[in-house]
C-alpha cells in the first residue's frame, strides 16, 4: 500500500495507522515562515516529516516513533525522497525523547482512541491508543520546544478540551485554531491548534470544510493541500 504525493511517495503497509486526511491537513496548515528546525512526534510512516521538509526547504526535520516497523518504513520513505539529508527518523518512546536542540515547530498527530475497545492487532492498538498519557506527549513537546517555538496538534473535538487544559497548565497559550468540518452542514469534527509559551499578539481562528456540496473537495481544501495531495488538486 502507498500514497503518492506530488514530490514524494509514502509506503505505509508496515504502519498500523495509514496516511490520513488529519495529517494531510496538519502538514499543510502549520505556519513555517523562517523556521529552521521541526520535530514530528510519533511520525508513523514519516508523512508529516516529509511534508514539512518540502514546505520548509532549509529546515532540519527530526522525527521519532515507538514502533520499530513504522520507524523502518519512515526511514525508507525518507531515503527515497528528495530530502534524505534533512530528515532524521529515530525509534524512541515519547516519555524518553530528548532532542539535541530545541525546535521552532513541533507537530503531533497523537493516538486519541483511548476510550475504544482493544484492537485485535497489538501494533494498531499501540498506534491508536498509545502507551503514554496526553501529559507525557505535552511534557515531551515542552522540553523540546524553543522559547519562540510553537506546538501544533490535530485532535477530534472531543479531545481538545482535555489536551488544552493540560497545555494551559504547562504554561502554553493557544495562538491558532483551525476548525475542520467534513461538510458545511456537519459539526466541527477535528481541530488543529497551535500553542506557544508567550501570550500571542493575536489568536487566529479559522474554519475548513473538506467537501463541497455534491461530495467533491472544496476549493479551500484544494488550495490548502494542493502542494501535496494529488486528489485535492485542480
Image (cartoon, rainbow, N blue to C red):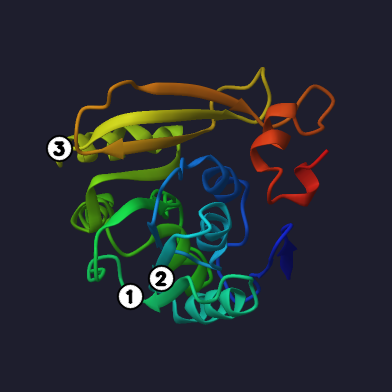
Q: Residues within 10 Å of mark 1 (few under 14, many from 20)?
A: some
Spot occupied by residue 5 in the image (x, y as percentages of width and height):
72, 58
Gap in angstroms between the C-alphas marked 1 and 2: 6 Å
Residue position marked by numbered label 1 in the rendering = 92
Give whichever of 233, 25 is nearer the camera.
Answer: 233
Q: Earlier in the sequence, mark 3 or mark 2?
A: 2
Residue position marked by numbered label 2 in the rendering = 65
Q: Earlier in the sequence, mark 3 or mark 1?
A: 1
Spot occupied by residue 233 in the image (x, y as percentages of width and height):
79, 42
Residue position marked by numbered label 3 in the rendering = 169
Spot occupied by residue 39 in the image (x, y as percentages of width and height):
38, 60
Which residue appears at 28% of the width and 35% of the height?
164
Q: Are marks 1 and 2 in contact (CB under 8 Å)?
A: yes
Spot occupied by residue 84 in the image (x, y as percentages of width and height):
55, 76
Which residue appears at 48% of the width and 60% of the height?
58
Gap in angstroms between the C-alphas marked 3 and 2: 26 Å
Amino acid at each position: 500500500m502507498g500514497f503518492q504525493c506530488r514530490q514524494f511517495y509514502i509506503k505505509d503497509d508496515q504502519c498500523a495507522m495509514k496516511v490520513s486526511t488529519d495529517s494531510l491537513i496538519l502538514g499543510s496548515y502549520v505556519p513555517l515562515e523562517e523556521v529552521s528546525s521541526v520535530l514530528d512526534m510519533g511520525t508513523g510512516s514519516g508523512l508529516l516529516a516529509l511534508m514539512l521538509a518540502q514546505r520548509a526547504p532549509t529546515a532540519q526535520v527530526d522525527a521519532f516513533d515507538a514502533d520499530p516497523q513504522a520507524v523502518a518504513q519512515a526511514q525508507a520513505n525518507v531515503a527515497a525522497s528528495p530530502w534524505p539529508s534533512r530528515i532524521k527518523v529515530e525509534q524512541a518512546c515519547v516519555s524518553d525523547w530528548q532532542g539535541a536542540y530545541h525546535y521552532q515547530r513541533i507537530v503531533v498527530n497523537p493516538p486519541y482512541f483511548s476510550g475504544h475497545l482493544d484492537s485485535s492487532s497489538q501494533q494498531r492498538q499501540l498506534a491508536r491508543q498509545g502507551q503514554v498519557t496526553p501529559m507525557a506527549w505535552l511534557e515531551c513537546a515542552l522540553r523540546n520546544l524553543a522559547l519562540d517555538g510553537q506546538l501544533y496538534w490535530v485532535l477530534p473535538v472531543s479531545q481538545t478540551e482535555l489536551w488544552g487544559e493540560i497545555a494551559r497548565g504547562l504554561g502554553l497559550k493557544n495562538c491558532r485554531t483551525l476548525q475542520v468540518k467534513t461538510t458545511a452542514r456537519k459539526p466541527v469534527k477535528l481541530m488543529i491548534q497551535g500553542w506557544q509559551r508567550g501570550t500571542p499578539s493575536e489568536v487566529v481562528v479559522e474554519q475548513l470544510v473538506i467537501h463541497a456540496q455534491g461530495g467533491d473537495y472544496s476549493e479551500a481544501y484544494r488550495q490548502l493541500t494542493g502542494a501535496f495531495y494529488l486528489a485535492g488538486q485542480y
